[in-house]
């Protein structure tokens, strides 16, 4: 279960979205919550008689007051809330350091989705977090979660996108954890672009049948009913986007991969196209937990 939840406060986005999702999770867990604002160390020149230490302390108090005001609704309800401000450059390094130090089970960050243009507007920090956050990352948007939310896990049972076999297992385990925690429903979904993966020795229909058999086998391992298992035919970005909308999915669980010797985490191109279009919350899970703090030179 979730014992420690870290919320990344982004000065460039509407943090009320992350606050609302934290409020929801506070109702269904006994977790401790930390709201973290990490910002570049300020320029400390030209402040008259004040020393650099005094200027930094003054700026710290100003940011801490704003952060405490943001979290006041949860604090007033008696939830286990703490707010923290750190100055660090680069910001990502400070965030990764604190995520590891705090031993977070989940990291939450607001993501800006614009219905008028049907796409997300990811900041530079969003993409950095997607690629390098060492713990499961919940990107929360404007969607409203019902009492029994519909949760979907996107899997690749044939591992044709270079995914390690254990990633699908970890994704399903995360999905089941959220299903139990929220009293929601869980669905398994796989996009099979049979036109691109069929070969000279396998027709498109045979390819689809092979994928479907592997998908059902995976579902059976986790006692997921077959009527909650869906194989979509076509490109992942297009098919999953429509599936989320048509089925009122509020949380999609997806995996990210490590493709370099330095354990830098990246999503595939098709997944990145999908992220731009999704209107639901997104939980990004990785198959392992890299030591990014050292890699980033913190």
Image (cartoon, rainbow, N blue to C red):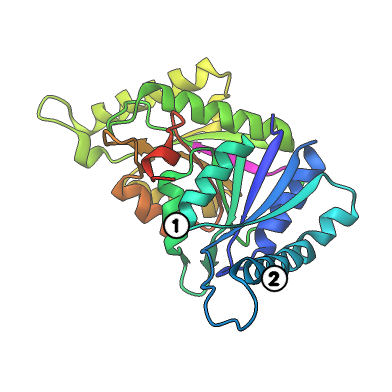
Q: In this view, does 74 lie above or below 154?
A: below
How many tags in the picture? 2
> Residue at 58% of width from left, 18% of height from top?
223
Task: Look at mark 2 in the image and give the residue it sits on.
Answer: 58
> Looking at the rendering, in which quadrant would you find the C terminus?
top left
> Looking at the rendering, in which quadrant would you find the N terminus?
top right
Which of these two is toward me, 29 or 264?
A: 264
> Where residue 240 appears, x then y in whole percent?
43, 48
Q: Which residue lies furthest to the left in this view?
A: 200
> Residue at 63% of width from left, 65% of height from top?
53
Q: In which quarter of the image is residue 224?
A: top right
> Where residue 47 appears, x then y in whole percent?
59, 81
Q: In this view, does 82 lie above or below 50?
A: above
Q: How far apart are marks 2 and 1 (CA)?
A: 21 Å
Please state the extent of the stretch shown in magenta in the rendering: 148-153
> What kind of secondary structure does the magenta stretch mostly adopt?
strand
- Mark number, residue 90: 1
With 37 as the anchor, is 217 left or right in this view?
left
- Mark number, residue 185: none
Which of these two is toward me, 82 or 268?
A: 82
CB under 8 Å between callouts 2 and 1?
A: no
């Amino acid at each position: 279960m979730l014992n420690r939840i870290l919320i990344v406060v982004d000065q460039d986005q509407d943090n009320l979205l992350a606050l609302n999702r934290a409020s929801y999770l506070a109702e269904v867990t006994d977790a401790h919550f930390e709201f973290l604002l990490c910002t570049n160390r300020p320029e400390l020149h030209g402040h008259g008689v004040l020393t650099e230490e005094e200027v930094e302390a003054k700026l710290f108090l100003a940011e801490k007051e704003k952060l405490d005001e943001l979290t006041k609704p949860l604090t007033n309800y008696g939830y286990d809330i703490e707010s923290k401000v750190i100055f660090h450059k680069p910001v990502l390094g400070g965030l990764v350091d604190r995520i590891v130090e705090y031993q977070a089970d989940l990291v939450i960050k607001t993501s800006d989705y614009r219905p008028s243009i049907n796409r997300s507007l990811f900041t530079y920090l969003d993409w950095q977090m997607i690629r390098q956050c060492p713990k499961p990352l919940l990107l929360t948007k404007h969607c409203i979660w019902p009492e029994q939310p519909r949760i979907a896990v996107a899997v690749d049972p044939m591992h044709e996108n270079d995914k390690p076999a254990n990633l699908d297992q970890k994704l399903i385990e995360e999905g089941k954890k959220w299903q139990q925690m929220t009293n929601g429903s869980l669905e398994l979904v796989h996009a099979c672009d049979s036109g691109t993966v069929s070969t000279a020795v396998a027709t498109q229909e045979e390819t689809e049948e092979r994928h479907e058999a592997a998908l059902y086998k995976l579902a059976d391992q986790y006692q997921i009913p077959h009527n909650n298992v869906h194989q979509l035919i076509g490109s992942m970005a297009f098919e999953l986007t429509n599936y989320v909308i048509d089925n009122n999915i509020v949380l999609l669980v997806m995996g990210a991969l490590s493709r370099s010797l330095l354990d830098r985490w990246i999503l595939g191109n098709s997944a990145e196209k999908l992220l731009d279009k999704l209107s639901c919350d997104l939980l990004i899970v990785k198959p392992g937990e890299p030591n990014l703090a050292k890699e980033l030179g913190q």
